[in-house]
Amino acid sequence: MSHKHETIVKPFSDVHNKGGKILATLLHDPTIEGLDVALYMDGSASMEDEYGPRGILAKLGGVRNQVEPQMRWMLEYLATKDKDGVLRVAYWATGDGSQIEVVGDLTGVQAKEYKFPGPQFYGKGTVMLPVLRDYVAHIRAQAEKGAKRGLAVIITDSQIYDPDDIKAYSAQVAKEIAGGRLPRLNFVLVGVGEQIDEEQMEEICHEEYPGVGHLWCHRIADKMEEMAELVAVLVDETMTVASGGTIYDDKGNVLKRYESRLPAVFEFDIPPGCTSFTLEVNGQKFTQPIPEEDHHDDDDDDEDHKPQATKPNTGNRGGHKH
């Protein structure tokens, strides 16, 4: 009995056989299965005006909380990427500048109900190492519950006090990932406003690590109102492009290898008699039976299955680092 055309295995959404040439479309990036996301918002003193007045002063009106609507938007969006729709949310750079105030494990479904008035104690500095330590401890615990990949989104409006510590710790984390002691992690760093040290962010994010590649990516938004949309664009770019992959035939022979990135739609040739192909990404393997050959060789058909790439105009500056 021949293979049914409808037999599509996740993470593929569409597979066509055109005379021994396979056109495959990914439903999503297989590397984000089991993703755990956390959101860390700058709580240093320089952010106090953006959070606006609290208590009785807040009721007098006139100055609004610019951060809260952005936090709600990001939480709702990032929850769609998370394995269970629940994010660890915290203020960082609080107290003496090295403390973290955990807001809680928040669901995206209730995002519009949460209040984000700012930390209890605004920080006197911007020390980031505690954020990385906090997230790595968190992902270790989540890995025991099934998390396969981690993403920490970190927002700041200031120059970072401890870039050398960040780089040293990042190298340590990369070794643990490469050694299989930690799940694959990504840190997304978004700077907001004029006090950002872009050169410093470049130095942190450009580093490549053996067996891992880049841990970091970054961009800079000019205004607080651009922050949430910019985070969404950067997370999509980071999480929907796998770090390469290999396609094998049913006998284990390599048919195609993607060294740097795995596209959402890809084509490759199969040998005669081949009944399936396997995509390997980050150690995970997905085997897809080859469907019956398409007999309507319509050029427009290919276009129907290619996603239309759209990029919002965020009016931001800064670079994206893979």
Image (spheres, rainbow, N blue to C red):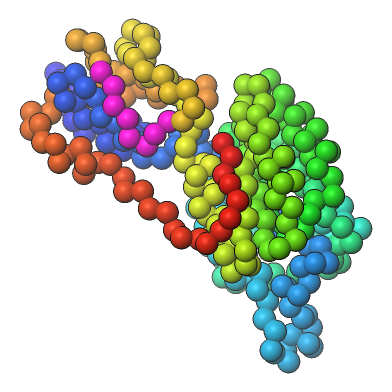
Q: Is residue 192 left or right of residue 16?
A: right
Q: Is residue 168 left or right of residue 75?
A: right
Does residue 86 appear anywhere in the picture? no
Residue 115 placement (x, y as % from top left): 67, 72
Q: Nearer the viewer, residue 246 or 277?
A: 246
Residue at image location 72% in from the left, 39% down from the top: 203
Residue at image location 57% in from the left, 44% down from the top: 320
Instruction: Judge whether residue 268 is colored magenta.
Output: yes
Q: Which residues are magenta?
A: 262-269
Q: Main secondary structure of the magenta part?
A: strand
Q: Is residue 130 left or right of residue 7?
A: right
| Quarter placement of the C terminus | top right
Q: Which residue lies most toward the right here?
A: 96
Does residue 269 appear anywhere in the picture? yes
Residue at image location 72% in from the left, 73% down from the top: 51
Which quadrant would residue 191 be assigned to in this image?
bottom right
Residue 206 placement (x, y as % from top left): 66, 36
Q: Which residue lies most toward the bottom here?
A: 60
Which quadrant would residue 266 be assigned to in this image?
top left
Instruction: Judge whether residue 77 is colored magenta.
Output: no
Q: Nearer the viewer, residue 78 or 213?
A: 213
Residue at image location 39% in from the left, 23% down from the top: 279
| Quarter placement of the N terminus | top left
The mark total stands at 0
Residue 175 placement (x, y as % from top left): 72, 24
Residue 145 placement (x, y as % from top left): 63, 37
Classify 309 as above or below 76. Answer: above
Q: Which residue lies most toward the front here?
A: 199
